Amino acid sequence: MQKPLRKVVFVDRDGVINVDLWKYVESWDEFRFEKGALEGLKMLSEAGFDIYIISNQAGVGDGIFTEAAMWQVHEKMVEAMKKYGILIRGARYCTHGKKENCDCRKPKTKLLEKAVTGVNFDKKKTFFIGDKSSDLEAGKNFGVHTILVRTGYGPKTEKKLTEALRPEHIAHNLVEAASIVIQNS
């Protein structure tokens, strides 16, 4: 018997869900939700989407902060989201350093593959929401639609877009991106 078809959306963390500090978020004290992030995630959650956070966290591998500190930030973030009525289905983080040649650092697709192992979903109705070219490239490499948000690195990424990297949609923030996902899935 085939598993039921799930609605899936991948979302980058830094610069999309939380304010990008232009350095690593090393502790919960530094974490601030991006304007509209909670509202957008709640829209997706209420519309029945399985939300997967996909994020490169090279600060761990580069020795800037510990993996335990990264997970502490994650747990507190998920706890705050849950209080807001948001269900996060899963999260995958690449903790390798920037110079390591791992299979999971975006724009490679190992994090996305691991996130949805055993999940029955339609890639043609799936989106990756991000603010960096590595997010867009990972989404395209995995065969899903991409949305660039104009938060975090989004404005810089938008100025450097090539035809090959151009996302299907550009949104001001996660609320607008959520609306696009819901309308097109």
Image: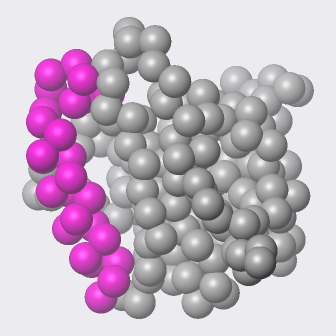
For the magenta stretch, what is the residue range? 58-83
Residue 81 among magenta residues = yes
Q: Indicate the quadrant containing the N terminus: top left, top right, bottom left or bottom right.
A: bottom right
Q: Which is the main secondary structure of the residues drawn in magenta? A: helix
Judge whether 160 appears above or below 169 on screen.
above
Quadrant holding the C terminus: bottom right
| Residue 119 position within the rendered picture, expressed as x and y whole percent measured from the top left | 64, 64
Colour mode? Answer: one colour
Left or right of 85: which side holds 61?
left
Picture coordinates of residue 135 (x, y %)? 60, 38
Quarter of image, res 4? bottom right
Residue found at x 73% / y 40%:
142
Q: Is residue 41 above or below residue 109?
A: below
Q: Is residue 11 visible?
A: no
- Please determine whether, in this image, residue 175 is positioned above or below residue 16: below
Asked whether residue 165 appears in the rendered view, the answer is yes
Magenta stretch holds residue 177: no
Left or right: 153, with 30 as reference point: right
Q: For the image shown, how many numbered marks are present on the structure?
A: 0
Residue appearing at x 15%, y 26% in the figure: 64
Residue at 47% across / 70% down in the picture?
89
Q: From the viewer's perspective, is 116 left or right of 181? A: left
The image shows residue 143 at horizontal and vertical percentages of 80, 43
In the figure, is residue 63 to the left or right of 141? left
Task: Name the residue at 44% across, 43% down.
Answer: 55
Residue 117: percent from left, percent from top: 58, 54
